[in-house]
Image (cartoon, rainbow, N blue to C red):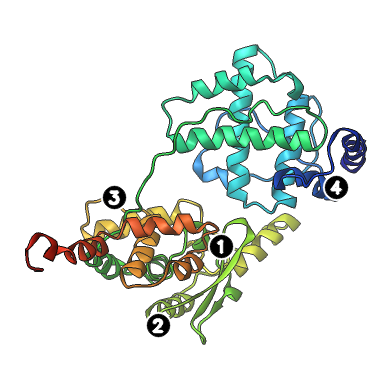
Amino acid sequence: MTVQQTVEDVTAKRTDRVPATPLPSRERIKERVTGLADLPSPVPIESGRPLPDRERSSIGVGAGLLTGQSELEQAMARFLEYQRSYRSHSPLTVSTYRCDLSQFCRWLQGCVGCLPEPSAITRELVMQYAVTLSGRASATVCRKITVLSVFFGFLMDLGELDSNPARRIPLPKPASRIPTAISEEEAQKLIQAAVSPFERAMLLLMLTAGLRRSEVGAIRLEDVNLENQALLVRGKGAKQRMVPLMPQTAEAIRSYLAARPEVEQPHATSRSNEAAALRGTSLFLSPQGRRLANDYLNRTLRRILARAGLAKRITPHMLRHTFATHLVRNGVDVRTVQELLGHADLETTANYLHSDTRAKQTAVSLIATLTGSTVS
């Protein structure tokens, strides 16, 4: 039975038991999932060791199902294919989902000795699994249980489950973290220590345009408009946004293009030709002419830090935090900052208001007359 036939059958069954009220937005997946009938069959989820960070973003979901898979693994493979092809989630997001589901499978094998059918997984089992995650960061625990809840909700929407065993599992309260930015003096030291055209262009894009690490690696040649000093950024969830470039940043990109490595020549296979075509459109390449690995920017930033003589730990995302914090300190409204950063939720951008200690000090100094003191 195809997915489309399954959905039609589920729709007919639900007409008798569901009142004619608007469905919650998540349950409307049932109405949209019919498009999966035209998608390629997914590959099985692997239940081996967790993949290292350098391999996580290269995980694909697109070949045929292998024989001998359990029903649970096949359901997870369909879920991952739905997230990748229909929901257009990024490869990194799908990789994270895959790793979280793989970890749950391994725990099930160790706990019950096999991979049960999805309908045999109870709320008690999910609760036991959640307890084993204690000691990890609260955000990590929340994500892992949420992924399970979304997965079981997907099976409910297909009519394969009557209830969601991971729904409303008590979750730890996420820790509230204020974004950490570097000082202007530290930023200037980093820029001076960036000696190669690539280092300077990469650093300025994160520091003066607020790009994420993944967004820097995803820039294509066609996305850069040096004449108008603008950049098309391909962000999370296939979202795009236009970001203006400072003259200094545009000049750094221009210098890099003059020294850009030659694209590595492909081997005599069609798959290699496709990979080479993808590399050819990427703005940034490794010295060997390949696409940048996930941790390449981290290693590059560590080299710049060593040259700058800065002992503190500075990550690529801290440069993005610095960009946003500096905008807020200079009076840019939160909505504009949200658009520049590509945040889907305004609350995420509002965190930078809490990190602006200078503005708070200025505000508090205005009530100096209340205590009879003078403003310094």
Q: Disc number at residue 247?
A: 2
Is 36 or 218 nearer to us in this picture? 36
Q: Disc number at residue 144?
A: none
Q: Is residue 284 above or below residue 73?
A: below
Q: Disc number at residue 34?
A: 4
Is 345 or 75 nearer to us in this picture? 345
Tell me which numbered mark, 4 or 1, is placed earlier along the sequence: 4
Tell me the element at label 1.
loop
Please identify the quarter of the rendering in which residue 247 is found: bottom left
Tell which residue pokes out farthest to the bottom in this image: 227
Q: Residues within 10 Å of mark 2 (few under 14, many from 20)?
A: few
Q: Nearer the viewer, mark 4 or mark 3?
A: 4
- Residue 358 left/right relative to 11: left
Task: Give the residue number, with chain letter if any, for mark 3.
Answer: 313
If the image is split into quadrants, where does the N terminus sit?
A: top right
Q: Nearer the viewer, mark 4 or mark 1?
A: 4
CA distance separating discs 3 and 1: 25 Å
- Amino acid of disc 1: Ala
Q: Is residue 279 above or below residue 317?
A: below
If the image is split into quadrants, where does the C terminus sit?
A: bottom left
- Residue 30 left/right relative to 313: right
CA distance separating discs 4 and 1: 30 Å
User: Which residue lies at the image location 74% right of the left edge and 24% below the top edge?
Assistant: 118
Estimate the x, y position of residue 115 in percent, counting from the top left: 70, 19
- Residue 197 left/right relative to 27: left
- Amino acid of disc 2: Pro
